[in-house]
Image: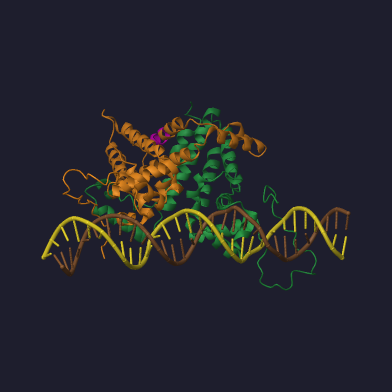
Chain colours: A orange, B green, C brown, D yellow
Amino acid sequence: MAAKRSGTRGKRPQRMCEGLQPVHEPRSEPPLSRDRIVATAVELLDAQGVDGLTMRRLADRLGSGVMSLYWHVDNKEDVFDLALDSVLEYRGPSQTAQDWRGEVVHMLEDWRASMLRHPWSASLLPRRALGPNILGRLELLSKTLSRAGVADADVNVAIWSLWNYVMGATITRASFDLSDDDRAAAQQRLTRLSERYPTIERSRLLLDNDWDGAFRKGLGFLLDGLSPDEAER
Amino acid sequence: MAAKRSGTRGKRPQRMCEGLQPVHEPRSEPPLSRDRIVATAVELLDAQGVDGLTMRRLADRLGSGVMSLYWHVDNKEDVFDLALDSVLEYRGPSQTAQDWRGEVVHMLEDWRASMLRHPWSASLLPRRALGPNILGRLELLSKTLSRAGVADADVNVAIWSLWNYVMGATITRASFDLSDDDRAAAQQRLTRLSERYPTIERSRLLLDNDWDGAFRKGLGFLLDGLSPDEAER
DNA sequence: CAATGTATGGTACGCCGTACGAGGCAATCC
DNA sequence: GGATTGCCTCGTACGGCGTACCATACATTG
């Protein structure tokens, strides 16, 4: 009956005897494991995007049968959850001790950078369960803001505002990061309609691409508003 | 060869003769049209969510064959694009003339409300093409900010920041809007791990649900930062 | 030896999006 | 009239998907 996976990790016993290393079976894949599945899923997502991840392709890359995956993983949703969280590990603030605001900015910019390194991840964030790395970031955020003196009643508002801002900015950035040609074509299309949309046509909204600067600036504004010096209730 | 749809709308000629209204064929469906397809798609999305929309189910609801849809619509992506934009129409500011800030807040809160009325829409926003209603909102936003005196160089940053904030907040709200039971269960799970995440456990982050208040407050902070009185470059 | 728990994977089912092409029906042209 | 042309509908079929079910294999334990 085998209650399947449930909390315990895989730990294949790896055949002990047979002299030294596995001498023959020369190019056999290492055994399946949850970790190896997740790592390969991330590779596949990086290479082919969200729609490119299918259980069959994943199994192919792993050199295994499709159904073998289901021993280590509940279903495809589970793969997404794990892949997303695995990409959001945070190693902590840079060595130099900083003020609370520097720490928050560092963590959030690192978060954004991690997601941009895997452009499929941002759009997955809202739909997925909160894994340990995500919870860890929220915990750190919460702790930092509390220590900075933000009123208890405001901490949750602040966390959600920051979460929303980072997620929104990163999703937008990732999905508007078209090739230059595409961008030009979009602006072209806009020009063709310029009687209708003169202002955004003129400001070349779709061509602007100082994403990093805009992110930093907007984040600054938000933190100004949130900082305990001025805002309460 | 029939280049299929391309810009021109459907306009079935509707049988002219036959006396008065179509007397018999008593319960026949009205003819297919792009508009009817989109409206039904929205119904289906409201009822079953993003994954619930399939071309077959859509055709069923319309009382037509599946492939008939493809005369009016390019493909399923197209249906998503059209459904999303159709839900984001903006009827303009409330009757009373307001200052620029009031106008911006009104439009953005209306935007958020429109998306929350159709919870599938927020998560679709980033992945979809910009339809006329979306462009119209951006145009209005741009015009309003310009008229308010925001420097040309800053208008695009402001628009993206607001777009990101609204989208992030709405996606979060829509996808965390679990039943009370689910929410309690999530918090329960968190409590079980409370050695790891003491702060967010204590602040009951996942139970807090004054979404509207948080949205308004965060938006206020952002607008403070963006308003032309204080910010430039 | 048998029994058990861990792990693999082949087959098959019911869905999906949609390519293709055969038709029906009105308006238009000879 | 009859033929042609555009608009519109839809049945069939193909290749792909997630995964339920089940047979199998091996290592460990009794």
Task: Judge whether residue B74 can be spotted in this image.
Answer: yes
**In which quarter of the view is residue A94 placed?**
top left
- Asked whether B1 or B143 is in front, the reply is B1
User: At which x and y percent is residue D25?
Assistant: 26, 59
- Asked whether A49 or A20 is in front, the reply is A20
User: At which x and y percent is residue B185?
Assistant: 31, 58
Height in image: B205 above or below B63? Answer: above
User: At which x and y percent is residue B164?
Assistant: 47, 41
Answer left or right for B198 relative to B75: left
Range drawn in magenta = A220-225
The structure residue drawn at horizontal position 69% and vertical position 73%, both measured from the top left corner, is B26
Answer left or right for A47 relative to B190: right
Query: Would you say the magenta stretch is mainly helix, strand or loop?
Result: helix
| Membership of A222 in magenta stretch | yes
Answer left or right for A8 relative to C14: left
User: At which x and y percent is residue A71?
Assistant: 30, 57
